[in-house]
Image: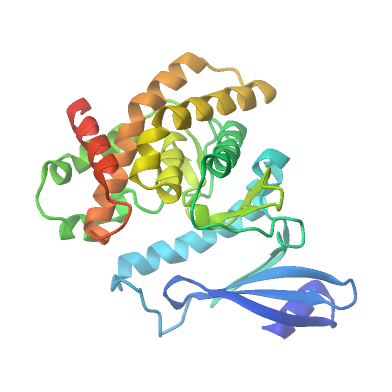
Amino acid sequence: MLNNIENLLKDTSIKELETLQSLWSGYGSIVRYVSLLSNQSFIVKQIQTDNENLRHPRGWNTSTSHQRKLKSYQVELTFYQQYAKQTSELCKVPELIASQTAADGYLLVLQDLDAAGFQMRTKSGDMPTVKLGIRWLANFHAKFMSTNAEHLWQQGGYWHLSTRQDELAAMPNSRLKQAASTLDKQLQQAKFQTLLHGDAKLENMCFNQQNNDVALVDFQYTGKGAGIIDLAYFVGSAFHQPELELYHDDILNDYFLQLKTALDANNTTLNFAELEQEYRQLYPIAWADFHRFLLGWNPNSWKINSYIEAMTEQALKQS
């Protein structure tokens, strides 16, 4: 791989510093390199698509999951090539330095966010941290409001129903299982569609040391959808049940305040009151839709609690 990177960057002084992580199910790795010539570090995401040893950690080794993963890496490359430059400092993403496509995979050379000042990670959220994530999402959603998401997922997120039939079949019979298609259609038919990050969990957020700025990574499931889907998924990754209940109103109010500010700054013309009404109605439905996925994928997930159950009940009553 080192030779590929040297050829791609036309730099023979490159050295490997550390492997940051292996990709899900053995699809490759994320490694930090440095150029001794420029004294600059960068991140290489190497995706291997023909690896015979691919293994899903939860046992979902199906052709469906493999094809979904292959497309997800194509989508991420497209996002960095065609969409990332449209983002602002308020929804910062790593810059794409170079890329390479081959028959057996992809190579993405990305800006090192640690070197750019976004070196802090957290596994548990507090409200100031979550508000930074909300600000990022609101600005991202405002930037891409009404996009056609060309060459990305036409339905963003990794858990939507059409790609999760195996997990649906694994669910015990319930009102939620019976309503799965109805809930999915309500989300798909939203009038105000934007680009979803698609995996906006706390682990994909990089914060600065002052904890007043954030950048996001991992755009494999970026695609079209109602922005409120990202919000529900994000806060569910950051908070446990007590915080979700305590900050329920604050989360929604802050998102809509940030979204309106960002839309106004972008001179986007739309009926914001109508958007807010639609998104508030879809919020419990977004929770229920993710709940459906969790129950089929990992019914013991810590994300299943009385809050998501209450939101699901509200969604079922609305539907």
Residue 176, placed above or below residue 48: above
Q: Residue furthest left?
A: 173
Looking at the rendering, in which quadrant would you find the N terminus?
A: bottom right
Q: Residue furthest right?
A: 37
Looking at the rendering, in which quadrant would you find the C terminus?
A: top left
Q: Is residue 2 left or right of residue 48?
A: right
Q: Is residue 182 left or right of residue 114?
A: left
Measuring from the top left, give residue 229's x and y in whole percent: 41, 39
Measuring from the top left, give residue 89's x and y in whole percent: 72, 41
> Is any part of residue 88 visible from this angle?
no
Chosen colour scheme: rainbow
Residue at 85% across, 82% down: 13
Q: In this rendered view, identify the residue nearer to me: 56 or 190.
A: 56
- Quarter where residue 278 is shown: top left
Residue at 45% across, 21% down: 276
> Is any part of residue 270 visible from this angle?
yes
Measuring from the top left, give residue 241's x and y in whole percent: 33, 44
- Quarter where residue 43 is shown: bottom right
Q: In this rendered view, identify the residue nearer to me: 297 or 54.
A: 297
Q: Is residue 141 left or right of residue 155?
A: right
- Quarter where residue 63 is shown: bottom left
Q: Is residue 38 left or right of residue 243?
A: right
| Count of labels in the image | 0
Residue 46, placed above or below residue 274: below
